Amino acid sequence: MKLKISRRGLISALLATCVIGLTNAGCSGVSKSDTGKIGYKPAALDVDEARKKARDVSGQLVKIIGVHGKLTEPGPSISTCEDAPASAELYATRHPWSVYDITEEELLQGMNNLRNRLPDHDWHIVKDGKSHSKAQSSEILAENKTEKFAAHFTALRKTASGDTMISVTVVSACYRAPAGTDLDREY
């Protein structure tokens, strides 16, 4: 299947990739009435635990990229799962970050490290090519069925701020919030 990814559709594409991976991982027997369009039964997980899991996955990806630059600071956020049944308290984590203050050579090395090392860490590369943007930046889209995460990596040469960076967005599969959790109060 060929994925077409735009900036606007990135979250949906990443979540769809997770769903594809999770469905292929053996979620048969889960009825659509229980899960909406997502096609699998989400695990119950506290929001803070889900954020910790997203930070841990991002930390592993920093090691896989293997270049020494600066990292952006924002932590993982949560959002409701759009295709979930209206009555379900389902959410996913989203963790955008980047490695910046790197040279062009380090940018290329980091992307090559991803290509070579992701499969050794249970990541399946779904797309490796050029973005559909005007810049035609190199991008990699990968999923990890074990961890139930997808990641989108983009090599950005000389951004508006003047930085060369690897932009990363890590998105989890959907989780079920524990009873009593008010997802509207979470961020």
Image (cartoon, rainbow, N blue to C red):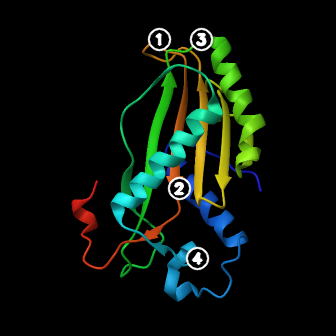
> Circle 3 is placed at which residue position?
103
Q: Residue at x 34, y 58 (%)?
A: 48
Say whether residue 126 is left or right of residue 157. right
Q: Position of residue 19 (x, y in %)?
A: 61, 66
Label located before the other in sequence (1 or 3): 3
* Amino acid found under the numbered disc labelled 4: Tyr
Residue 162 circle label: 1
> Circle 2 is placed at which residue position?
12
Question: Which marked residue is nearer to the observer: mark 4 or mark 1?
Answer: 4
Question: Which marked residue is nearer to the observer: mark 2 or mark 4?
Answer: 4
Q: Residue at x 60, y 32 (%)?
A: 154
Q: Report, in whole angstroms, how far the alpha carbon at label 2 lies from the one at label 4.
A: 16 Å
Question: Which marked residue is nearer to the observer: mark 3 or mark 2?
Answer: 3
Label located before the other in sequence (3 or 2): 2
Label located before the other in sequence (3 or 4): 4
Q: Report, in whole angstroms, how far the alpha carbon at label 3 lies from the one at label 2.
A: 31 Å
Seen in the picture, residue 145 relative to 77 is either above or below; the reply is: below
* Amino acid found under the numbered disc labelled 3: Thr
Q: How many marks?
A: 4
> Circle 4 is placed at which residue position?
40
Q: Mark 3 and 2 residues: CB-CB less than 8 Å, in contact?
A: no
* Amino acid found under the numbered disc labelled 1: Gly
Label located before the other in sequence (1 or 2): 2
